[in-house]
């Protein structure tokens, strides 16, 4: 099965200013530091690259320290002994592990580490993350591979996120010109499908993100995001006029860590899928083939039209481009789309490319840096409110709020809430049951709610719901 994003609750007070130390000013470290600094957190970043630290210091109000993140003196200088959270986000597993051990020993309250080695993740692992001073491990390749696997399983989706332990899903679907939804209001859509529990929680239209109300009309090329119980997703797809695509043949361009992990996860689905993986390097392709007997590994250039044609690109149902060159990923996906491949998925590294990807013809795009930054970010938002996921390429977040006994909304019906403009409650977890939220639902202490909101109103939502 895939790897849906998990939810952790840390005992960090909501809206207090946190002292956060980030080790590593690579792309992930910079994205995180800018994100957290923009939320007025007390952020310090450690790196040996003076040039990278200079970029951080010029971009925002961040304290930068030049030095080795595994040096005890540097960690003390950065304030690790009294900090709330340390994030070890360098490109080296070894550096992150050593930095985590030292940070925990020095007194850091919580430690998150970026670690690619999956030997630490299994229940039977001889060494647990806690033994190394790590509270939470983030594995970007594994998270991204799980995300791609979910998209393949729902080939009609542009986005697919599992929440509430997989019992609910948020699915993104682009409405074709012939969709029966075009011209209907949300109220009419719901009325025509009263046998399905669902709610449209966001619409992406012409570069603008809309948190819709009942009178909003659907238009051609709208990208809609719907929350529903997992067993109703197929009905949701059919109701939009987008047929659920049959998947038999899958081609993966790139034998990167992500590409290999995607291939392995797809093989584990036991659906009889035929999987081909194209890798330019002869040595890498030979090694991948020797380690993965269920995958047909080809050595060649995934942007070569002749190679794609000779290997049956026209019979491929899903084409996935996950090389380290995002331009190659985009080009090969566009080429596959031109050759009538029903579903193409590209891994891109620049977040700015994500909203453009579907405009130029890609069905879905995923971003490793944004994925890991969002995953770490949700642990910072507190014990009651936390980010479950960002919706790719649009101005919207999925937040989970646990209703406490003294919450402003405890005991109130959803329809009587005065939520800030630009947010919506989409799902409720009560005891062991999950449901799509309706206006008549009452929020009780102990319930969890999934809130969909634009970035600009996250703090306003937190103030109202805490």
Image (cartoon, rainbow, N blue to C red):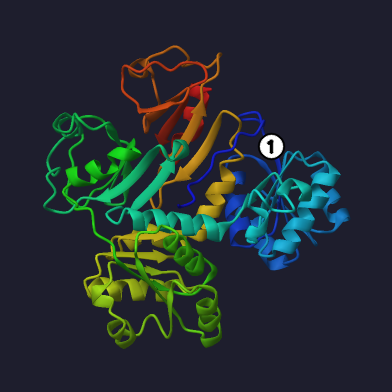
Q: Residue at x 22, y 29 (%)?
A: 214
Q: Is residue 420 above or below residue 245?
A: above
Q: Quadrant of residue 246?
A: bottom left
Q: Residue at x 35, y 85 (%)?
A: 304
Instruction: Count numbered badges in the picture.
Output: 1
Q: Is residue 296 above or below residue 356?
A: below
Q: Report if residue 79 is visible in the image.
A: no
- Residue 395 percent across, percent down from the top left: 40, 45
| Left or right: 165 in relation to 191 | right
| Left or right: 124 in relation to 417 | right
- Residue 207 percent across, percent down from the top left: 31, 51
Question: Circle 1 sits on which residue?
Answer: 18
| Left or right: 140 in relation to 280 | right
Tag 1: Cα neighbours inside 10 Å, few (<14), some, or many (≥20)?
some
Q: Report if residue 236 is visible in the image.
A: yes
Which residue is at the front of the view, 316 or 176?
Answer: 316
Which residue is at the front of the view, 419 or 174?
Answer: 174
- Residue 121 percent across, percent down from the top left: 64, 52
| Residue occupying the far right of the picture | 73
Judged from the image, the secondary structure of the residue bearing numbered disc 1 is loop
| Left or right: 236 in relation to 385 | left
């Amino acid at each position: 099965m895939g790897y849906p994003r998990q939810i952790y609750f840390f005992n960090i007070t909501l809206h207090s200013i946190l002292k956060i130390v980030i080790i590593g000013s690579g792309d992930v470290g910079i994205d995180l530091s800018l994100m957290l600094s923009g939320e007025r957190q007390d952020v310090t970043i450690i790196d040996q690259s003076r040039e990278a630290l200079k970029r951080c210091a010029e971009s925002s109000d961040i304290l930068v320290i030049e030095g080795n993140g595994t040096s005890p003196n540097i960690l003390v200088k950065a304030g690790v002994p009294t900090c709330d959270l340390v994030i070890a986000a360098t490109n080296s597993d070894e550096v992150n592990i050593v930095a985590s051990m030292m940070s925990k020993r020095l007194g850091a309250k919580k430690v998150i580490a970026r670690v690619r080695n999956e030997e630490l993740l299994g229940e039977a692992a001889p060494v647990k993350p806690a033994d190394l001073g790590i509270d939470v491990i983030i594995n970007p390749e594994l998270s991204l591979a799980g995300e791609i696997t979910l998209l393949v399983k729902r080939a009609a989706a542009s986005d697919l996120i599992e929440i509430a332990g997989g019992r609910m899903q948020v699915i993104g679907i682009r409405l074709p010109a012939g969709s029966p939804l075009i011209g209907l209001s949300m109220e009419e859509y719901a009325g025509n499908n009263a046998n399905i529990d669902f709610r449209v929680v966001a619409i992406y239209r012409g570069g603008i993100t809309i948190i819709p109300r009942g009178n909003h009309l659907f238009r051609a090329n709208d990208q809609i995001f719907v929350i529903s119980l997992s067993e109703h997703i197929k009905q949701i797809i059919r109701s939009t006029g987008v047929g659920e695509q049959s998947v038999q043949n899958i081609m993966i361009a790139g034998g990167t860590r992500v590409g290999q992990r995607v291939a392995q996860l797809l093989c584990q689905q036991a659906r009889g899928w035929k999987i081909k993986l194209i890798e330019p390097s002869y040595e890498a392709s030979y090694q991948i083939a020797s380690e993965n007997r269920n995958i047909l590994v080809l050595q060649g250039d995934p942007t070569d039209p002749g190679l794609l044609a000779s290997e049956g690109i026209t019979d491929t149902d899903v084409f996935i481009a996950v090389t380290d060159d995002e331009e190659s990923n985009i080009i090969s996906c566009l080429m596959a789309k031109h050759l009538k491949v029903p579903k193409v998925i590209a891994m891109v590294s620049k977040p700015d490319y994500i909203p453009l990807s579907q405009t130029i013809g890609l069905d879905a795009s995923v971003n490793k840096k944004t994925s890991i930054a969002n995953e770490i970010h949700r642990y910072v938002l507190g014990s009651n409110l936390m980010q479950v996921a960002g919706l790719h390429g649009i101005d919207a977040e999925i937040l989970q709020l646990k209703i406490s006994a003294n919450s402003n909304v405890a005991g109130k019906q959803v329809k009587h809430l005065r939520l800030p403009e630009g947010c919506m409650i989409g799902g409720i977890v009560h005891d062991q049951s999950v449901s799509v939220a309706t206006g008549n639902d009452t929020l009780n202490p102990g319930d969890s709610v999934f809130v969909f909101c634009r970035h600009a109103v996250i703090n306003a939502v937190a103030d109202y719901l805490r």
